[in-house]
Image (cartoon, rainbow, N blue to C red):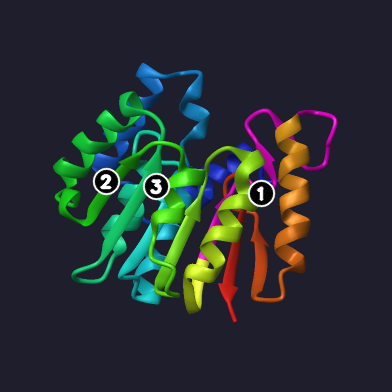
Amino acid sequence: MVTDEFHDYLVAHGSEPDGIARDLVAETRAEYPRESGMLICPEQAAFMTQLVKIIGVRQAVEIGTFTGYSALAIARGLAEGGRLICFDLSEEYTKIARRYWARAGVEDRVELRLGQAQELVRDLPERPELDLAFIDADKAAYPTYWAELVPRLRPGGVILVDNTLRTYNGSVLDLDSSADARHIDAFNKLALADTRMESVLLPIGDGVTLARKR
């Protein structure tokens, strides 16, 4: 387990969030203190930006945007001409996201689609053209999102799945702690068994599964 001291050290020895990212996080915590646990952590944001750059991502999808921190991390790493489609239910939360995307100069790279992601994701082209997808939404629907996105990934494309060690209300080591913990444990087993993908579960933040299409 990473102690608070080790966490502070690893954040201090990675690329620091800039003022825009810090302000986004601060506003989210001030406006939505209870829900702010849905934010990704700063080292995860830095990891995602680097990964997007390394892969050379041009076509990306995010399911679950909240106030836009993870989308900002992805959009900042996109190759020239790249595009990120974000799915979320909340107009309220994503109003904050839109402001910070504009402030960071990435609003032209991000398309926000509001509504039920389980339905809207089916409107994506069925061709295997996605370079990257990020799933961070309702845990019970993770298998649905996985089923829709894996066929749409190009060979070598990547899916990142958040909270695969714990959610903010339960841990995979204590399946009695919450329904979300049980949903995550079931999803982890599903992802591992999918022969189309090769996966690794990383202890970043609350756990991130990185899966690459064969």
Tell which circle, 3 or 1, labels the residue nearer the N-terminal end: 3
Query: In the shown orientation, is residue 46 left or right of residue 185?
Result: left
- 192 relative position to 26: left or right: right
Q: Amino acid at mark 3?
A: Ser
Residue at label 3? 70
Label 2 belongs to which residue? 18
Q: Is residue 85 above or below residue 99?
A: below
**Which residue is located at x 60 percent, y 82 percent?**
214
Q: Which mark is residue 97?
A: none
> Where in the figure is residue 50, as x and y percent of width and height?
39, 65
Q: Main secondary structure of the magenta part?
A: loop
Q: Is residue 176 magenta?
A: yes
Q: Which residue is mark 1?
A: 164
Q: From the viewer's perspective, is the residue at label 1 or at label 2 nearer?
A: 1
Residue 28 lies left or right of residue 147; in this view the side is left
Q: Position of residue 96 (x, y in %)?
A: 27, 30
Q: How many marks?
A: 3
Task: Please tell me whether residue 118 is drawn above or below residue 30 in the rendered image.
Answer: below
Q: Which badge, 2 or 3, is on the more N-terminal residue?
A: 2
